[in-house]
Amino acid sequence: MKKLLVAVFMLLTMGAFAQQTQIALLKYRGGGDWYANPTSLPNLVKFCNQELHTDLNPNVATVEAGSPDIFNYPFVHMTGHGNVTFDKAECDNLRNYLLAGGFLHIDDNYGMKDFVMPQMQKVFPELEWVELPYSHEIFKEPYAFPNGLPKIHEHDLKTPQAFAMIYEGRLICLFTYECDLGDGWEDQRVHKDSDEVRLKALRMGANIIQYVFTQ
């Protein structure tokens, strides 16, 4: 079964199916605002389709952590402020999804770290979070970020960090912390970021998309 699911993900990312590959936003329990940054993912998809010549579906789906529908989406994004809770069924579903070839990108909109990192260790108790060095491939192509994640919004005067869960050599979950990429992907009117700042955020997002679909 797992081999079959991996094959499905490979076909999706190579464009072997007639329909466009679709990415999704993760809906979770616990009280955190999983629905934050509503314009961010559509803008990232548009940027990748224009600049990387991807063929992603412009309509972003919403999927629950415990839903079998999650297997339809090779890339799932998670964001918000504050509390996150996964029960055993959701942990099992997320684990199976990620082992089958899926990918979870968690972008801290502010205040998620103390909640989401322990919850993900319930999903993979045998794994530890590791910080990606600036030399990691995800910071190199197609856009160079020699100093790692760009700083989009300031909160606690901390340096942005990229934490990852890696299973048998494959990066399966990325947690972008203290940078607020999703805010930079939003429509300019929302946060009134400069074009330069928004471009940095979108380019870093494009690096993540390309890395996921080619690693």
Image: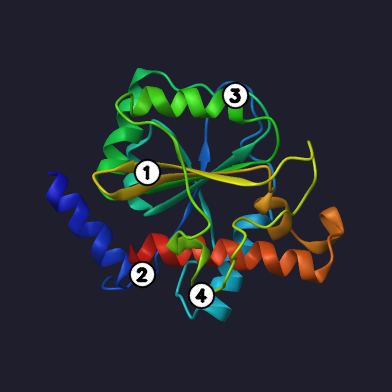
Indicate which label's residue lies in the foreground, 2 or 1: 1
| Residue appearing at x 72%, y 53% in the figure | 151
Question: Which labelled disc corresponds to residue 178?
Answer: none
Q: Upstream in the sequence, badge 2 or badge 4?
A: 2
Which amino acid does the dot numbered 2 rest on? Gln
Residue 193: x and y, percent? 83, 60
CA separation in Å, label 2 and label 1: 17 Å
Residue 91: x and y, percent? 36, 26
Q: Upstream in the sequence, badge 2 or badge 1?
A: 2
Q: Work out whether 70 lies above or below 113.
A: below
Q: Classify mark 2: helix, strand or loop.
A: loop
Which amino acid does the dot numbered 4 rest on? Pro
Q: Which residue is mark 1?
A: 70
| Left or right: 171, with 6 as reference point | right
Residue 189: x and y, percent? 85, 60
State whether residue 58 appears in this view. Answer: no
Q: Upstream in the sequence, badge 4 or badge 1?
A: 1
Q: Which residue is mark 3?
A: 114
Indicate which label's residue lies in the foreground, 2 or 4: 4
Camera-side residue: 203 or 53?
203
Residue 190: x and y, percent? 83, 54
Q: Classify mark 1: helix, strand or loop.
A: helix
CA separation in Å, label 3 and label 4: 32 Å
Q: Which residue is mark 2?
A: 19
| Residue appearing at x 61%, y 36% in the figure | 34
| Residue appearing at x 28%, y 70% in the figure | 17
Q: Upstream in the sequence, badge 2 or badge 3?
A: 2
Q: Which residue is mark 4?
A: 142
